[in-house]
Image: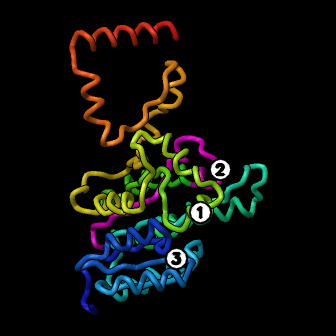
Amino acid sequence: MSQTPDRVVLITGAAGGIGRALARRFAEPGTALVLIDRDSDRLEVLRGELDDVPVIADALDITDEEAVEDLVTRVENRWGAVGVLINNAAYAYDEDLLDTTPQRWDEQVAVALRAPYLCSRAVLPGMQRTGTGVIVNMASVNARQYFGNEAYSAAKAGIESLTRSIAVRYGPDGVRSVALGIGTVLTPGAWDSRIERDPDIVERLTRWYPAGRLGSPDDIAELSHFVASDAASWITGTTIMIDGGLTAGNSQLAADVLGRSPRRPLAADDVADHRERTPIDADGASEVRRDREADIGEIR
């Protein structure tokens, strides 16, 4: 366990739902983990679950420049340069913009945008020295469309820009930078109180997602692991949307425009029956197409 690892992975927000899934996914032979979270108790629990890999767990303030720099120095002295940085930490207050005080705005932007800047700034020199490195930034659908949480959303839009800047400026040094545009993720614990207050909330949210379900922390961890791997070596400077199809289009609006009920996923038992009731027929399909085109033409 004391030997130099093949790769050092630093994860912020490691004790949360997505952070824990990230830590478990990257806990593999040859990897050392640096886990950062403000919740020291949950961080220690997570550390105890990862006894197969070397771990540094630290409950430091990632918005503090000196604290971040000191941590990275300690890591480099022990294991060498950080090879993968995952800027995962973020949070948002559920309040109206007019009710958001400047202090609350600054708190959210500090964690969601200042911290990724500080962490990236701290690890980049080591990545330049070794000629390799990957920075994975957790962005959000909120960066692209309005879903509330204005401070958080503005910070996530900034994350997409920071991702592109790092990719272009430091790409010649062997550094890649990729953002993940995340939709609603059903994280354990974080949703418990909301579901208790509103038992139907998951079902209501799910209807907006073409994939027919909300995301899971493991969905994010799997994509992050791929993006950080050599298999993704030509992916950089972009945002990969992992949102169950949410930003691909609005099926609810489309159904209203076309005067139809929105499609619902078929249950497994209904699939065979559905196929029997809707045989494939080229002429019939053409008629349906013409009817639909006529409908759309009238609406336009």
Binning the other alpha carbons within 10 Å of mark 2 as few (below 14), some (14 to 19) or many (20 upward) gives many
Residue 215 or 31: which is nearer the viewer? 215
Q: Give residue 130's quadrant in the image.
A: bottom left
Q: Amino acid at mark 1?
A: Tyr
Q: Earlier in the sequence, mark 2 or mark 1?
A: 1
Who's the residue at 40% across and 47% down the image?
Answer: 241
Q: Amino acid at mark 2?
A: Glu
Task: Give the residues in magenta.
Answer: 129-155
Q: Earlier in the sequence, mark 1 or mark 3?
A: 3
Q: What residue does disc 2 label? A: 150
Alpha carbon separation for disc pair 1 and 3: 12 Å
Query: What secondary structure is found at the residue carrying circle 2?
Result: helix
Q: What residue does disc 1 label? A: 91
Q: Is residue 138 above or below residue 63?
A: above
Q: Is residue 122 left or right of residue 40?
A: left
Q: Tags 1 and 3 in contact by the CB under 8 Å rule?
A: no
Q: What residue does disc 3 label? A: 37
Q: Is residue 209 left or right of residue 1?
A: right
Q: Earlier in the sequence, mark 2 or mark 3?
A: 3
Query: What secondary structure is found at the residue carrying circle 3?
Result: loop
Q: Amino acid at mark 3?
A: Asp
Give the percent coordinates (x, y) of residue 233: 24, 56
Who's the residue at 49% across and 81% down the image?
Answer: 43
